[in-house]
Image (tube, rainbow, N blue to C red):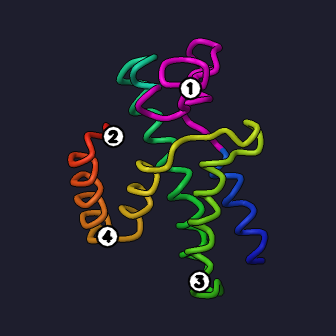
Amino acid sequence: MSAVLIVTAYLFGCVNGAYYIGRAIAKEDIRTLGSANAGARNAGRIYGAKAFVMTIAVDALKTAVPISIVLFYEDAPSLIPYWVGLSVLIGHIWPIQLQFRGERVLLFILRQCLFWSLSYFCLLGSSLCLVCLLNDFLL
């Protein structure tokens, strides 16, 4: 049963919100436009704020749904939720149906931390923001 949950979580992770929203809105592959990244920020740049918010929502759901299923499944061993989260992350970065070319991982990790614990989210988020500001990165 655990293997089925982990594989299913990978498949959830493979759902790339920006890619499918780009296909639905403009029949384009977002990975060939803008920054060539299939992420929320690029979707926002190319298709506007509505696409940005929709991409964030799809990506949040693809994290929350499999982890919630495992957490509510009473017989799951204690490490399975973490393996499921990792599996969603792997699907997010390397989706099989997109020839293993997925999204970047920074915002995704922040969403996972928010789902797991608000304190982890605040700690990791403030640390990442500090690193980004010090290194002149853009989120």
Q: Quadrant of the C terminus?
A: top left
For label 3, the SS is loop
The 10 Å Cα crowd at callout 4, few under 14, some 14 to 19, many 20 or more, is some
Residue 121 disc label: none
Where does label 3 land, which residue? 79
Residue 139 disc label: 2
Dot placed on the residue nearer the N-terminal end, 2 or 4? 4
Rendered position, 69 above or below 96: below
The mark lying in front, picked from 3 and 2, is 2
Location of residue 108 in the rendering, given as x and y in whole percent from the top left corner: 46, 51
Q: Quadrant of the N terminus?
A: bottom right
Q: Amino acid at mark 3?
A: Leu
Where does label 1 land, which residue? 21
Q: Is residue 60 magenta?
A: no
Q: Amino acid at mark 1?
A: Ile
Could you tell me which residue is drawn at 29 percent across and 67 percent down?
A: 118
Highlighted magenta segment, given as a residue range: 15-42
Where does label 4 land, which residue? 120
The 10 Å Cα crowd at callout 3, few under 14, some 14 to 19, many 20 or more, is few
Q: Amino acid at mark 2?
A: Leu
User: Mark 2–mark 1 contact, CB under 8 Å?
Assistant: no
The 10 Å Cα crowd at callout 2, few under 14, some 14 to 19, many 20 or more, is few
User: Mark 3–mark 2 contact, CB under 8 Å?
Assistant: no
For label 2, the SS is loop
- CA separation in Å, label 2 and label 1: 21 Å
Image quadrant assignment for residue 19: top right
- CA separation in Å, label 4 and label 1: 30 Å
- CA separation in Å, label 3 and label 1: 33 Å
In terms of depth relative to the viewer, which is nearer, 4 or 121?
Answer: 121
- CA separation in Å, label 3 and label 4: 18 Å
The 10 Å Cα crowd at callout 1, few under 14, some 14 to 19, many 20 or more, is many
Could you tell me which residue is drawn at 39 percent across and 33 percent down?
A: 53
